[in-house]
Amino acid sequence: MKKTKSLRREAVDYEKLYEETIKELHDGESSSAFANALKQFDRAAETLKLTNNQVAVIKDPRRVVQVKLPVRMDDGSIKIFKGFRVQHNIARGPAKGGVRFHPDVNEDEVAALAFWMTYKCAVVNIPFGGGKGGIVVDPRKLSMGELERLARRYFAEMMDIFGPERDVPAPDVNTNPQIMAWFMDTYSMHHQNYIPGVVTGKPIDLGGSQGRNSATAQGMVHCVHKAADYFKMDLKGTTVAIQGYGNAGSFAARLLAKDGCIIKAISDVDGAFFSDKGIDPENACQYVEKNGSLINYDKAAKVKKIADPMKLLELDVDILIPAALENQITHKNADKVRARIIAECANGPLTTEADDIMEKKGTFIIPDILCNAGGVTVSYFEWVQNRMGYYWDEDRVLDELKRYMDKAFDDVLRTSIHYNVPMRTAAFIVSIQRVTRAAELRGLYA
Ligand code: NAD
């Protein structure tokens, strides 16, 4: 434990980081996800006329932890990985947020994702704060044994950070129920107790919740239904393009296809594919299951390969669903995006500059902190079930999820109309008000 603490850095000056990033603007736009997140915050804070004291308490992360992770590889060598955990805010409850395994993970990105978690949990009104973690690694290059040792080492190094009442991680990009099971086991063995509530997104056999796998996409679908009602759109025959075909993207495709939508294009890290008649999402899932990704999917199914995968974002479809990574739509391509609705399954897929362009075009954006909140909402149900030791059936989970998502969408839409602001700013207004109230009621310790 001593070794862990000496490696930790607490005093990151986020105001400075923000200023520096703004200075580094290239072509008038920052690539920093955290700078983007803070700009989104500023817009809502301005509308709410928050005081400097209110902003000071809820804007920056409360804790940033970086750890070194030595892992013995299968060939006997020791490889060092870098891991992060950021707790952004815990005014409304334990920090909550996934752990991402990706070669591009960095402190800026994790801080942004933790920030979004605070406001995501508040927008759906579940009793959590915001956190996020990550390891700089390409998990595809590790064996199962190496992956398990890395996951366990990460959790062991963060033992005093995590806990069912402190900070509760979950899956994110490239992490899954098996990794959550290793996290939970590491924590439980250390405490000589069975503690399933320390992590969510676990396998069902280990205290996972029914409905968790599809929850993020299901929550997005509830938002899309609400948006369709608002615009009096019939979803039958509505065309859709989806960037990213992992957990969020593949369930999004399957659920929307069940509603009669035509999935015109899908993509993943290995390519983008298009069919005018529509792609069969089940067939694409089976293909990914067998081949590990969509690579060469055009050869296996009657679909076209899109030469430049980024062009998927510019297709003439009704609904565009970014479900991969952040900063995908920027001032460089926003003008070319033709979708009428963007449903953000991914976190931070649009920069604020892109937001401005989309707003001028009249595109309706269902913002990430609302649109993809179904995942964390069912994670909350999982945590509740773990603490009760009583498990719900899938129907109950899905009913509760719909209730939370519909209420959150209505709150945000009403706020958007009331203040005459875009949906993203409205989502931040709803959630910032809740976080500010909790922070003020708690006051300052010391
Ligand atoms: P995942 O690892 O299951 O899937 C990610 C997908 O994105 C994969 O298909 C991958 O190949 C693809 N991808 C990666 N880089 C790409 C690129 N440059 N172009 C196109 N595709 C690319 O991850 P996930 O859980 O589906 O998460 C996707 C997004 O949704 C992330 O932004 C995540 O933070 C967000 N999200 C996920 C959940 C959840 O419960 N899974 C909840 C909230 C938000």
Image (cartoon, rainbow, N blue to C red):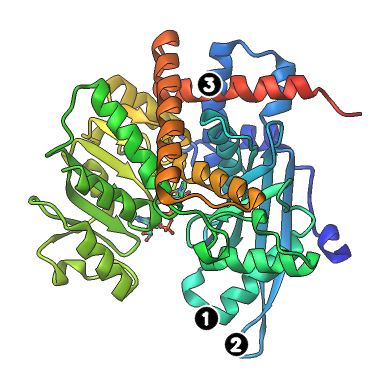
Residue 335 locus on image (x, y percent): 27, 32
Name the front one of labels 3 and 2.
Answer: 3
Quadrant for the N terminus in the image: bottom right
Q: For the residue labelled by badge 1, is the local secondary structure a helix, a strand or a loop?
A: loop
Work out whether residue 383 or residue 183 is closer to the camera in this orientation and state it: 383
Q: Earlier in the sequence, mark 3 or mark 2?
A: 2
Disc 1/disc 3 C-alpha distance (Å): 44 Å
Residue 147 locus on image (x, y percent): 57, 74
Other residues around mark 1 within 10 Å, as few (<14) / some (14–19) / many (≥20) = few
Name the front one of labels 1 and 3.
Answer: 3
Task: Give the side of residue 360 with respect to residue 174, left or right.
Answer: left
Q: Mark 1 is on which residue type? A: Ser
Q: For the residue labelled by badge 2, is the local secondary structure a helix, a strand or a loop?
A: loop
The residue sitting at the bottom extreme is: 75
Q: From the image, tell me which residue sits under label 2.
A: 74
Other residues around mark 3 within 10 Å, as few (<14) / some (14–19) / many (≥20) = many
Task: State whether residue 392 is above or below residue 23.
Answer: below
Residue under the image location 52 percent in, 77 percent down: 142
Q: Mark 3 is on which residue type? A: Val
Task: State whether residue 400 is above or below residue 387.
Answer: above
Quadrant assignment for ligand 1: bottom left
Disc 3/disc 2 C-alpha distance (Å): 49 Å
Q: From the image, tell me which residue sits under label 3.
A: 430
Instruction: Place residue 95 in its image quadrant.
Output: top right
Q: From the image, tell me which residue sits under label 1.
A: 143
Q: Which mark is residue 119?
A: none
Residue under the image location 12 percent in, 61 percent down: 303
Work out whether residue 184 or residue 104 is closer to the camera in this orientation and state it: 184
